[in-house]
Image: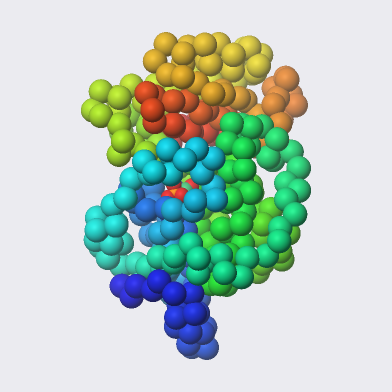
Amino acid sequence: MIKFEHPAAIQAHLADLVKAGKQIGFVPTMGALHHGHMALIKQAKQENDVVICSIFVNPLQFNRKEDLTNYPNRITEDTKMLSEVDCDILFTPSKDELYANQKEIKFNFGSIAQGMEAEYRPGHFEGVAAVIERFLSILTPDRAYFGEKDFQQLAIVRWVKSHFNFSTEIIGCETVRDENGLAMSSRNYLLDKEDYTTASQIYQLMTYCQSQLGKQAPQELAKSCFEKLKENFRPEYFEIVDEHSLEPIKQWEDSKNPRVFVAAYLKSVRLIDNMSLNKPSQA
Ligand code: AMP
């Protein structure tokens, strides 16, 4: 695996690969890698000749300073994991260099950024859009891979692609879960053993919603799950929305693709998850 820190250096390397007709896949991450990230890298390896993984903890997308300070740093373990899955390139830019040629962006996301993460993390998606614009401009990959774990973020990434007319194909990948259904997350490294078990209640409530599809009214169902979560978590939201507009569903007939979204604190760790209510569970 080749490592690059400087945008100009990786661009020179990529120019040669593109000249040689190679297809480039890109997986952006903030490090503290786990099996969810590895699934993205493996899919990118299958569909491209060369795969770049970036590790960059983007300060612009953190609305709480303590979240940024506490974000796990595991660069030694991460490098080892990436080598083991034969990732070709690791890109770890500095903030100053990455944002050196930043464009003025007018954010006009529409309904996809009106609730949920947008409401509880003001400025978060502006930071996400800014960093994705930088990465796609610098690397111009053929394909970029993102997890459905951050489903609202994926909608923002698609907005960035179409807003700036990037030719990169944006590929959404299913959420990878542990054996109890808990979505893999870098933040899980901050949970102790007991909390880790408790955390899977989020998954249980989401699968309960799947079982209630077409039965209980969506908003009543969401409210009762929110109340249930309060027993062990500090929930921020529990929403049943249409997966395209991301707007809450009043009746099941309002959406062909209902999806449940959750954000809740377990002690000081903020967990998010989501699941389609149409598909059977993937755990
Ligand atoms: P992060 O390092 O948290 O910014 O995540 C980097 C990428 O990995 C994002 O596209 C995430 O959506 C994706 N990702 C994180 N957790 C998972 C998971 N459990 N399954 C699939 N993709 C994931």
- x, y percent for residue 237: 57, 24
Residue at horizontal 51 percent and vertical 28 percent from the top: 263
Residue 142 appears in the picture as rendered: no
Residue at horizontal 43 percent and vertical 44 percent from the top: 68
- x, y percent for residue 271: 44, 32
* Left or right placement of residue 283 versus residue 223 in this view: left
Q: Quadrant of the N terminus?
A: bottom left
Residue at horizontal 73 percent and vertical 46 percent from the top: 109
Q: Is residue 22 shown above or below 93?
A: below
Which sits in the foreground, 75 or 227?
Answer: 75
* Left or right placement of residue 221 versus residue 97 in this view: right
Q: Is residue 196 shown above or below 80?
A: above
* Left or right placement of residue 39 versus residue 196 in this view: right
Residue 233 appears in the picture as rendered: yes
- x, y percent for residue 31: 37, 53
Give the mark count.
0
